[in-house]
Amino acid sequence: MPAAEYVSPEGLRLDGRRPKELRQLRAELGVLSSATGSALFEMGNTKVLAAVFGPKPVEQRSQEDEKRAIIKCEYAMATFSTGERRRRGKADRRATEITMAIRNTLEQTILTELLPRSQIDIYVQVLQADGGTRCACINAACLAVAAAAIPMRDLVASCAAGYLESTPLLDLNYLEDSGGGPDVAVAIHPNYDNRVVLLQQDNRLAIETFEQVLELAVAGCRAVSGFMRERLQEHTQALAAAQDAGEQDDVGGGDGEDDDDDVMGVDDF
Amino acid sequence: MAAPLISQGEVEWITAGVSYNTRNDGRKREDFRQLKVQLGMLAQATGSARVQLGETDVIVGVKAEIGVPDADRPDCGRIVFGVECSPVASPAFRGRGGDELSSELARALERSMYPGPSGRGGGIDLSVLSIVSGKTCWVLHVDALLLNIGGNLHDAVSAAAKAALADAKVPKVQVVPGEDPNGKRARLQLPGHSRAGCYSSVSDPEAGLAWPSKRVYEPDYEVDDDPSEAMRLDASGMPICITVSLIGGHCVVDLTVQEELCSAAAMQVAVDASGGVCGITKRRQKGIEASLAMEMIEVAQRAAAQLHTALSSSLAEQQGQQQMAVG
């Protein structure tokens, strides 16, 4: 089997992208009617669905926190999501690790102190996995939380970068990820001077190269956050338009003061 | 599953409406909600379909794997059904919460697809999935994932399974004879096309040239990656499950979550496109009189015709679009 060439001499990767190019991003909000907030997020072929239920009363009284909301998270991969069909048990170790990563990241982002004694459930379902699943999950979860009108201190955007054939590569797909090179997954708060809220690295990486790769990943996160903000604004405008149209039909309708119900409750934007 | 709440007043309202042949969303007792079908959205699956029946949302992926046939049906492939309840549908499906519901749904799908001893007559003709009799065959794993609960899950899941199987493109397999120590060759047609290249000069088996040295003389197989050579499955005979419920003594079809809380007895009937009944299961707590049971089966047959038509026209439209996109 010929050695796979991750970066061709012309500087193109296996899927035709340049080294610093993100895959195509797609997002849709409010895709599930039962959830308080939901979002479908796609990074290239990786498709992830996130649903948020809450804030609601805590299910187990013993876990109730009088100062803040508790966050429960679960990550599930569909049996058809990977190339080889794998019957994944829910207690899979990787799934537990990713669940913790998502919960940890969202705990730092959601203003839990504003919702004491309550519980927020965040569930993520992977429909198709092609590398960068944990990043897509965090992005989808962030959009779902926003769609659920839960206050956050900032958007959280996540992206991964790697290093193969002496080139830092942004947003690895599954083939590149399996290439044996390092994989650095990062999540940031873009408005807080890009402060890092998640950082995970697999495999070996020289410390000088690490800075390069980290910078690239953070730049990728900023691009993702820009995209997420655009989608959120479009979604809110559509909701406001629908609300206005509805009010015109009402007899003596309201004066639109509830327009901001679905906007994130952060004032610094 | 966390039971949604319903008040006695709402139950009486819905029951009264049903007796006047009007439901909360304006439908009649035997009307289905809008059916939306999307094919082929999972690039890594052999076939896939997403079906939305009202608020109920299901994705089904079909994956074809090489496996061993059953001992009692050596010339047939196999189909294995699995259902998963995604936690995004409800917090009740966290951890193992959805196991009971998913086994029930998977079992219902399996029962409606029991084939006869020849592999035919079970919805999908399993004999087309055989590769080498008694040794190798295609095993189709049909996995459904519930994304949103909007009532009437069984019907949506079976319609989605049918759509996904109709979308499935099973790769073409070439059976290649292995080297036989007695000098006899299996009588097999070998097309000129070859992906690996090492079989390229096999047109003259008698010459004994270019056979890779194999000690085993069992036939070997080669999977062709070319999508235009893939085999499409004939899912037209596959039944769809129709759930007929009793609300206040009337037969109602395609219930929403609220309506399901008002019904104490239901019959699930698997009906195929020609109106033939393929399986019956009684659900929920209350008993049904025999005459009423017969009436429910007839209602199911009528309703099935509606759903089959809606599904086939959606499938035809989607497959037409796919052809245009490729061609």
Image (spheres, coloured by chain):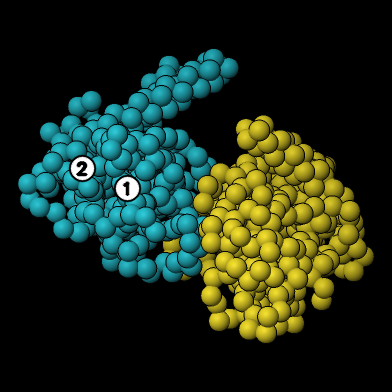
Secondary structure found at label 1: loop
State the residue in front, B178 or A190: B178
Q: Mark 2, chain letter?
A: A
Residue A244 is situated, as x and y percent measured from the top left of the image, at 49, 18
Q: Which corner quadrant holds the N terminus of chain B? A: bottom right
**A2 left or right, relative to B263:** left
Q: CA distance from mark 1 to mark 2?
A: 12 Å
Disc ID at residue A167: 2
User: What's under tag 2, amino acid-wise?
Assistant: Thr
**A72 left or right, relative to A47:** left
Say which label, 1 or 2, has the lower sequence index.
1
Q: Mark 1, chain letter?
A: A
Q: Quadrant of residue B281?
A: bottom right
User: What's under tag 1, amino acid-wise?
Assistant: Glu
Q: Which chain is yellow?
A: B
Residue drawn 71% across and 52% down? B232
Q: Nearer the viewer, mark 1 or mark 2?
A: 1
Q: Which corner quadrant holds the C terminus of chain B? A: top right
State the residue in front, B311 or B283: B311
Which residue bears the numbered disc 1?
A5
Residue B306 is situated, as x and y percent measured from the top left of the image, at 82, 44
* Residue A121 in view, yes or no: no
Residue drawn 37% across and 55% down? A2
Residue drawn 38% across and 69% down? A91
Residue A47 is situated, as x and y percent measured from the top left of the image, at 44, 45
State the residue in front, B284 or B66: B66
Residue drawn 30% across and 55% down? A179
Q: Which chain is cyan?
A: A
